[in-house]
Amino acid sequence: MKAILVALAVALCGALPAAAADLGEPVILVAKRQLTDKLYGATILVARPIGNDQHIGFIVNRPTKITLGQLFPNHAPSRKVPEPVYVGGPINPESIFALVQTSKSPGGRSVQLMPGMYAVFDGKAVDDVIEHEANHARFVAGLVGWRTGELRDEIKRGAWFVLDADPSLVLRNPDGLWEELVRRAELRASAI
């Protein structure tokens, strides 16, 4: 994310202290109300460390109006997936990734985002998910990446609520989910 975004968040909400977050483990990030960036405002992300205090993640609550069938009209299994493709993030937005709720690796180039949830990166493995696991997956275009210390800095500056990783949140219907998670996080913060 751009340094301007973080500066904007700080200017809008002040440097609110964030609860100590273990960013060495997967987390759910919930944009605070003050984060009004066009892409990241009112978002929910799943994020995981990739080493050297760097992280990758996916926005999970931004559906597009486009389905897999519209993107791949000659692929019969894609035409059977009624859910829209989601905006996953600004990095590689032309690539479709699968976020799959499963206890074992779906194969190919995939990485465990958290226990019970994998991200699938390569085309053949994504096709396999479309064909066999579409009911347990969310398909996203693009991803989010944070350089060394960048996510930790954004949290310190008050851009995100940090929640425990929960694979069930990744596939939930996004309608009203951000509002629910913000209320829950605000109640938890005010109780401290």
Image: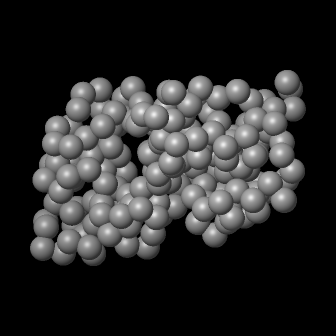
Residue 146 as seen in the image, left or right of residue 93: right
Q: Residue at x 76, y 62 (%)?
A: 8
Quadrant showing the N terminus: bottom right
User: Which of 145 and 120 lies nearest the eye of the viewer?
Assistant: 145
Name the one closer to the observer, 144 or 105.
144
Residue 160 image point, x, y percent: 68, 45
Q: State whether residue 144 is above or below residue 104.
A: below
Say whether residue 36 is left or right of residue 174.
right
Residue 94 in the figure: left or right of residue 34: left
Q: Residue 113 is drawn in which quadrant? A: top left
Q: Residue at x 21, y 63 (%)?
A: 78
Question: In x, y percent, where is residue 103?
Answer: 29, 26
- Colouring chosen for the image of the structure: one colour
Left or right? Give the position of 148 relative to 66: right
Query: Relative to 163, is 180 above or below?
Result: below
Number of numbered labels in the structure image: 0
Which quadrant of the figure contains the C terminus? Answer: top right
Residue 170 x %, y %: 47, 43
Q: Position of residue 191 (x, y in %)?
A: 86, 26
Whether residue 136 is visible: no
Q: Nearer the viewer, residue 125 or 137?
A: 125
27 relative to 182, above or below: above
Q: Residue at left 45%, top 69%? A: 64
Q: Is residue 5 visible?
A: yes
Residue in the foreground of this view, choosing between 8 and 81: 8
**Residue shown at the point (17%, 38%) measured from the top left:** 107
Quarter where residue 171 is shown = top left
